[in-house]
Amino acid sequence: MPKETNRRKALAALLAHSSIRDAAKACRLSEETLYRFLRDAAFLKEYRDAGRKTVENAISRIQQTTSEAVVTLQRNLHCESPAVGVRTAQIILETAIKGVETLDILERLDRLENGNSKTP
């Protein structure tokens, strides 16, 4: 199973490094081998799925800190520096607007997927 081991090493290296060259060095395979793996549809799908999982995990970790971030924004909203207070207020308002827009889009998408295109 050396080929499968090389594919696993390549996958891990590609996820951990920002360039093919660095990934190849890290997993001790040639750059051409990594390019060949990336031309393989099954490997490419596995690579993209693993990358997507990595991003989803990162987003989850960010979401876990949102309550703490909101507390920080609330504290900075009333700090002694007007510039910090204004910037904090701007962040809060922009985030609130984006949240409403996202909820609206999700609601519209749900209606389209369920065959009910009429607005409430």
Image (cartoon, helix red, strand yellow):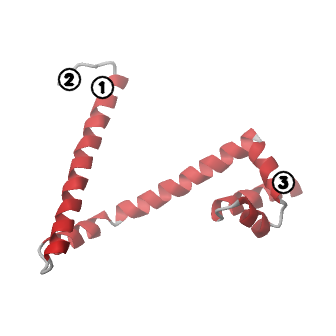
Q: In which quadrant will I find the N terminus?
A: bottom right
Query: What residue do we see at 28% from left, 68% from top?
Result: 69
**Residue located beneath label 3 in the image:** 32
Residue beneath disc 1: 111
Front residue of this view, candidates 42 and 105: 105
**Quarter of the image containing the C terminus?**
top left
Place of residue 10 in the rendered image (x, y in percent of width and height, measured from the top left):
75, 58
Look at the numbered disc 1 and give the secondary structure of its residue. helix
Cα distance between the residues tagged 1 and 2: 8 Å
Left or right position of 12 against 49: right
Rendered location of residue 55, percent (x, y): 51, 55
Kind of residue at disc 2: Thr
Residue extending farthest right: 2
Visible residue check, residue 40 = yes
Classify 10 Å Cα crowding around label 2: few (below 14), some (14-19), many (20 and above).
few
Give amino acid for label 3.
Glu
Decide: few, some or many residues near mark 3? Use Cα within 10 Å; few <14, some 14-19, many ≥20.
Answer: few
Residue 119, which numbered label? 2
Which of disc 1 and disc 3 is earlier in sequence?
3
58 sits to left or right of 13: left
Q: Give the quarter of the image for residue 59.
A: bottom left
Q: Earlier in the sequence, mark 2 or mark 3?
A: 3
Residue 19: which numbered mark, if any? none
Query: Residue 6: horizontal and vertical position, in percent?
Result: 82, 58
In three-dimensional space, the C-alpha distance between marks 2 and 3, rounded to whole angstroms, equals: 54 Å
Q: Nearer the viewer, residue 118 or 4?
A: 118
